[in-house]
Structures are given as structure tokens and as C-alpha cells.
Amino acid sequence: MAPLLLTARFGALLVSAASLVVSLASPRGAAAAGEETPRFMVVDLHADVPWQVHGKGRSPKLVEGQARIEALRKGGYGGVVLPIYISDKIKGGPKIDDAEAIYRAAVSIVEASAIFLPLGSRAAEPDRISTFLAIEGAGAFAEDLTAIDRFIDRGVRLVSLAHARNNKLASAATGGGAKFGLTDLGKAFAARIYDKGALVDVSHLSDAGFRDLVPIAEAHGAPIVATHSNARALCDVPRNLTDEQLRTIGRTGGVAGLNFHSPFVKADGAATLADVVAQAEHMIAVAGIDHVAIGSDFDGDIKPAEGMGDASHLPALARELGKRGRKDDEILKLFSLNALRVLGWRPSKPKASKDEPKAL
């Protein structure tokens, strides 16, 4: 069978507001002897390589790590979201200047390897990887909500309002004990993100924050996206999603990105590829086949499930899903098409909402 990468097509891929149709590229080059040729293009909603380059001195050429270039090639990657992770543990608190520095690290990664298409490219190309940006932990923007505009203008598609700790915008899933979800400032910030054409990422948001976000997203006709979270029903940690949240994600046209970090896959933290498949199957059963994607969390200091050690293992996941009865078109949705749909979202005229404050 010819790779599905050669036959499927999608629209509205990149940051341009104009819709476009791009051929899904074939895997990067011919497979070496003994290598498995990827049959499905992967678009990963969360690979933490900018943080590794900025914070840990890793080479922007990505010659090491879970999302190194060779692993991306073997895994069949055709797209990746590079998060600008702004730690809320920075001494003195995170600043917008920190976001600028990590943005430059992301740019250096894209510029260091010919396999990556430039940020903002309007068409995919065979044997290359489309690049997108996100902001992970936007607490610094409480000092100036308007500063998000220039990041969205430069290609940021997804913004998480909090990370590990509560901040002036929102309470975090791991913040503990907060009696609020989104602050008034956070609600205004979320509305601004949607108005500018990007999406809010709920992966690190508290349950209360998730609830507060829903009416704002609905008023803007925006899908709710969790870039790298699993199902809490199978692994009860606050970073995972309840079934109610998964249903809401499906109802709004959003996606939940399947995370490969063992403690988010299985309660005892000793997860295997089979447990990753179980997570995928549960998320699909609850949210729907059009609403689950890949959000590996590779290079985010994670402990990958056994059998999913790096990006090269995505073909093994596809094979196991096939054994469970998943059809090729379903796997392609999970691996790339669902992610591309939300990355291509653009706002329509928002509806009035009593729950949405006026932008500051």
C-alpha cells in the first residue's frame, strides 16, 4: 500500500488567514535497511526542544534527545509545535523578556536544520517539517496583556495561561488549593488571544480555570485544546482531563493531545506502549475520533512509556492501534489531521457573552 501521507490532503495549515490546501508529504527520505517506513505523518502538538536549547544548552541542531532530528525523521514527523516554555520558578518571577529569549531559541532551532520549514511557511513540502509556536505558561503577560499580540503575529498558535503554579491570570492544575479559575485579567487575556486568532491551551489549567474558559471559547467559536494531557479516568492526576472535559473538547471541535509521560499514562508510572494505546482508545471513545491528537511532551524532562522512548517510535504506536482495529483514516486523524485542523483555526465574529469581560 502506498503511504497515506501521499494521498491525504488538508486545508488551512499555517498561520496565514487565507485557506490553503497542502499535500501531506512523504516520510523524510527512504528508510535505511531494516528501518520501518512511517505510513502516517505525525503533527506533534508539544515537543519541548526550545526549553532544552535555551535552558540546558542543547545544540539547536537537535542531535540529541527524544525529539532529535533523526528520531523525528524515523517517526514520520511532518509538523511540530515548539513551545516557548516560561518557567514560573524563575527567580524574581517570569518576565516577557524571558519569552523573547526562548522565542529566539525556537527560531535558532528552525534555522539550524534544513528539515524544518521556516516559521510562517504557507505550504508543506515533502521531506520537511512544518513548524508552529506555542507559549507554555503565560503568567508573565499579566504585566502587559497587549504584549501577546506580537507573539501571535510571529506565529504563536497556542497559549497556556498557567504552568505549575497559580498566577495573576489563572490557577494551575498543580497549583493546589486555589479558590479561583481564571481571574478577570485572565478572562480578558483569553478573549484577546481568541480575538487575535490564536487558541488557549488548557493542559496546565485547573478544573475551575477550564470551566471559566468554556463560555469565552464558545463566544468566539473557538475549539478548546489540551496540547499534552491524557484521560484522568485511566490515570488520576490533576494534569489529565476528566471525561466531562474530554466531551467538552469534542463538542467545541477541539483536540486533546496524547501525552507519553509515564506518570500521566498509568497510575503507577510504569506505563508501556499498551497503556498509551489504552489512553488513546479511552480518549477517542469519550471525545470522538476527530478530537484526539499527538502531544508527546518529548524533551520536557519526561519519562516516556516503555516502547515510546522517543519520536522514532510513532510507527509502533500506529501499528498497535491498527491491531486494535483502528482504520488507516482514523490513525491519520489522530496522528496529524486533527492537530492541523485546530492549528488552522481562525476567529469569526464573536457572540456577546455575559461571562466575557471587556478586553483591557
Image (cartoon, helix red, strand yellow):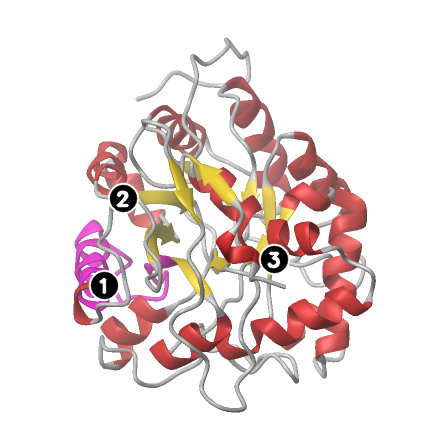
Q: CA distance from mark 1 to mark 3?
A: 25 Å
Q: Amino acid at mark 2?
A: Gly
Q: Earlier in the sequence, mark 1 or mark 3?
A: 1
Please identify the residue farthest to the front as the structure is shown: 1
Tell me the residue at 52%/85% (across/down): 35
Q: CA distance from mark 2 to mark 3?
A: 23 Å
Q: Which residue is mark 1?
A: 110
Mark found first going from the N terminus, 2 or 1: 1
Quadrant of the snapshot with the N terminus: bottom right
Residue 88 colored in magenta in the image: yes
Residue 279: x, y in percent? 74, 63
Given the image, on which type of amino acid does mark 3 rest? Ser
Q: Quadrant of residue 127?
A: bottom left
Q: Seen in the image, is 321 located left or right of residue 181?
A: right
Q: Secondary structure at mark 1?
A: helix
Q: Residue furthest bottom?
A: 34
**Which quarter of the figure is the C terminus placed in?**
top left
Mark 2 Cα shell of 10 Å, populated few (<14), some (14-19), many (≥20): some
Instruction: Name the spot of residue 273 as percent of width and height, x first.
Output: 71, 77
Residue at (50% x, 73% y) in the render: 75
Return the residue at label 2: 155
Question: SS at mark 3?
Answer: loop
For the residues labelled 1 and 3, say whether their Cβ atoms are less than 8 Å apart.
no
Label 1: how many Cα within 10 Å (few below 14, some 14–19, many 20+): many
Q: Which residue is mark 3?
A: 229
Q: Residue sitting at 67 percent across and 50 percent down?
A: 329
Magenta residues? 81-109
* Residue 177 seen: no
